[in-house]
Amino acid sequence: MQMIQKFDIIIIGSGGGSKITRPAANLGLNVAVIDHGALGGTCLNRGCIPSKMLIHPADILSEIRSAHNFHIHLDGPITVDTQSLVDYVSTVVSEESDSIKPLYEAHENITYFSETARFKSNKEIQVGDQIITADTIFIAVGGRPFIPAIEGLLDTPFWTSTEALRATKLPKKCVVIGGGYIAVELGYYLQAMGVEVVFLVRNRMIKHEDDTIISLFEDYFSKYYQVVFGANPTKITHQKNEFSIYLDDDNPIVADALLVATGIQPNSDVLGTDNTDIQCDEQGFIQVDDYLQTAVEGVYAFGDCVGRYQFRHSANFEGQYLFDHVVKDGIKKPIDYPPVPHAIFTNPQVAGVGLTERECQEQHRNYYCGTNWYKDSAMGMALKSDKDFVKLIFDTESHCLIGAHIIGKEAATMIHMCILAMNLNATHADLTRMIYIHPALPEVIRNAVRNAISN
């Protein structure tokens, strides 16, 4: 009979799972952590960190190329050593990932399994040739790029975000299938580096944003990028180092690279959940209750694999909640999400928190808005902003800020004062009473507050 090794806690996944692993071990608990891939999860290895390290140089290039707007003239062509840039980013990311294993090995209460976890029963997990168990199990396996069912696609050397972030030799032309945040971020990076980029968008771009922001983004983006709306690729071939992407006619779009960025799917399908009582929805997302517990008592799931909020910062929040209330205190308290913000690091940058107008209408909630263009502020004039915009949404009865949406310069930073305001239940009057530094960019938010008038 095969021996079963018992732990106090098992954590599947070293990305969001890191919020629990060492803190639990520091409490003296015997912890097993399982991850077959590079330690640190998607965010560190093939997501937000390497992408932002590449997008920052893209931002610099965009500023340089717009210098003429400020009567600054740069002589000669701008060149980028892509090989050195990507090698640098890959090295930094790999070093960060490689630094995690020694930390695990140095901790007497952590056992690391570089294997794929597969449930044999509700509480028994196969790792390599061993079976381990624990009373408390946390699943944080994340997700991976979703690959659409397009004829011929799987027979081609297409990119997902994973390959695009490691490409040291960039193509002359790249077709991007998708219009979500991964598509527009990586497409922006590629075009800034000199690649001709064509976006194929089935419906709308960044479709979960407020409708005003979507329209502004699409209008601006379409001026500087080739965007084909209503595109539904039906067939893809690859011959002589060229992709042919067929839409509804016989005239394909030809390119030497193809990036598929059509969303993510959870990694739950490798866990063997069919051997357990754990429930997944039709898309594979693990179903959890208000305590992030699955249908199996003592087995919890969080992060991308549950599909609530697919951000590392929300996974960190969920992981911290589970450590505080399940591991440390044992106090049964449902998770209470504060307003969950997000940002899209493309050009123009986009950020949001709280409700959109569309969601307010769907919820039959009474609201009023305040808007302002960056250009209608002193700093906006200095930036020669022509596309940047703020929308604030207030509840009609409480006058509390319930939504904020920004497109433009420093949106991901600007949104934080709105996040704080929403967490503190700040009202329209509270934001009016603030003294804003002149001529700092947040005056755009002040102006939007002033323009918000309740009916």
Image (cartoon, grey):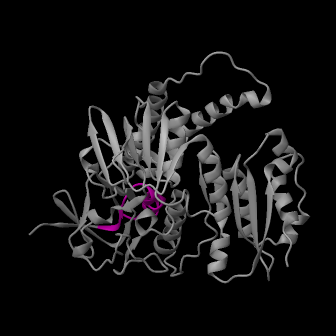
Viewer-nearest residue: 47 or 411:
411
Rendered view: 422 above or below 236: below
Quarter of the image where the C terminus is located: bottom right
Image position, residue 121 (x, y; %) = 22, 75
Rendered view: 33 above or below 332: above
Q: Residue at x 33, y 42 (%)?
A: 244
Q: Quadrant of residue 58?
A: top right
> From the viewer's perspective, is 130 left or right of 398?
left
Asked if residue 23 lies in the magenta stretch, the reply is yes
Q: Residue at x 52, y 59 (%)?
A: 311
Viewer-nearest residue: 55 or 65:
65
Viewer-nearest residue: 383 or 425:
383
Q: Residue at x 82, y 61 (%)?
A: 448
Quarter of the image where the N terminus is located: bottom left
Image position, residue 70 (x, y; %) = 79, 30
Q: Residue at x 90, y 47 (%)?
A: 438
Q: Quadrant of residue 35?
A: bottom left
Total number of numbered discs in the rendering: 0
Rendered view: 234 above or below 103: below
> From the viewer's perspective, is 130 left or right of 323?
left
In the current view of this chain or complex, which residue is farthest to the top?
76
Image position, residue 106 (x, y; %) = 38, 47
> From the viewer's perspective, is 384 left or right of 76?
right
Question: Which segment is the magenta one?
Answer: 7-30
Rendered view: 259 above or below 274: above
Asked if residue 84 lies in the magenta stretch, the reply is no
Viewer-nearest residue: 214 or 123:
214
Q: Is residue 142 visible?
A: no
In the current view of this chain or complex, which residue is farthest to the front?
250
